[in-house]
Amino acid sequence: MSELIPIFIFFFAVIDPIGSVPVFIATTTGFDAKAKRHIAYKAIIAAAGILLFFIIAGEYVLSAMGIPLSAFEIAGGIVLFLFALTMIFGEGKARSELRMAKTVTETAIFPLAVPSIASPGAMLAAVMLTENDRYSLVEQATTTGIMLSVLAITLILLLAAAPIHKLIGNGGANIVSRVMGLILASVATASILEGIKTYFAL
């Protein structure tokens, strides 16, 4: 259990279910309740498919390109850290992605599925937390289950978007995103240090 909680927190930070609520509300303005439910389901299915692809094939793609996982772990940590900084000091997920929502029609795919739910950080996490050399099939399956559970929570929040948004508002969602960003920055730093340790065999 002590090992599962950090993985859950990691995926919760990079997927950021609460931060996706204002994005969902903005992108579904004008749709009826039935259409909103369909958009929520389609967005989660698309995000799950993308993240499962990275879990299954991400490492093989890296191997085919001759990129060691330690290098990917360092690069991924740097990207995650920069992503975390935008969550902490930037406009916040909700406000920045609301602007994207005004210019798109395929709302279930963009910006909901990508980059709001299946964010770059989530894609990197899917690869790093399921390395074949470090984790057994059981551990990888467990991690996949945790990721899917976070996506299930995201779906529940999207389906209950209206009352949640009324409760926390855009400001509340931005506060949560910044707290998750701080946690993510710590995880990213640990990833960089672990990658350096592995690469240089320290």
Image (cartoon, rainbow, N blue to C red):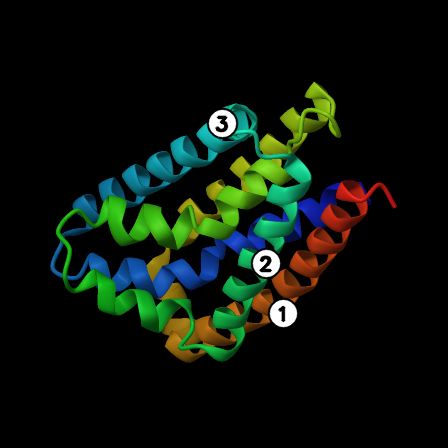
Amino acid type assigned to the residue bearing label 3 in the image: Val
Can you identify the residue that label 1 sits on? Answer: 182
Between marks 3 and 2, how big is the CA–CA gap? 20 Å
Query: Residue 9 at what x, y percent from top left?
Result: 65, 53
Q: Relative to 45, is 178 above or below?
A: below
Can you identify the residue that label 2 sits on? Answer: 78
Query: Residue 183 at what x, y percent from top left?
Result: 65, 64
Mark 1 or mark 2: which is in front?
Answer: 2
In this view of the protein, which residue sits in the foreground, 152 or 3? 3
Amino acid type assigned to the residue bearing label 2 in the image: Ile
Screen quadrant of the N terminus: top right
Q: Residue at x 64, y 34 (%)?
A: 68
In this view of the protein, which residue sits in the foreground, 111 or 30? 111
Query: Residue 163 at what x, y percent from top left?
Result: 36, 65
Can you identify the residue that label 3 sits on? Answer: 61
Q: In which quarter of the image is residue 182?
A: bottom right
Between marks 1 and 2, how big is the CA–CA gap? 14 Å
The local crowd at label 3, few if under 14, some if 14 to 19, many if 20 or more residues have their Cα within 10 Å, is few
Q: Relative to 67, is 77 above or below?
A: below
In this view of the protein, which residue sits in the foreground, 69 or 143? 69
Q: In this view, does 143 lie to the left or right of 121?
A: right
Q: Is residue 129 visible in this depiction of the protein?
A: no
User: Tag 2, which secondary structure?
Assistant: helix
Question: Which numbered marker is on residue 70?
Answer: none
| Label 3 vs 2, first from the N-terminus | 3
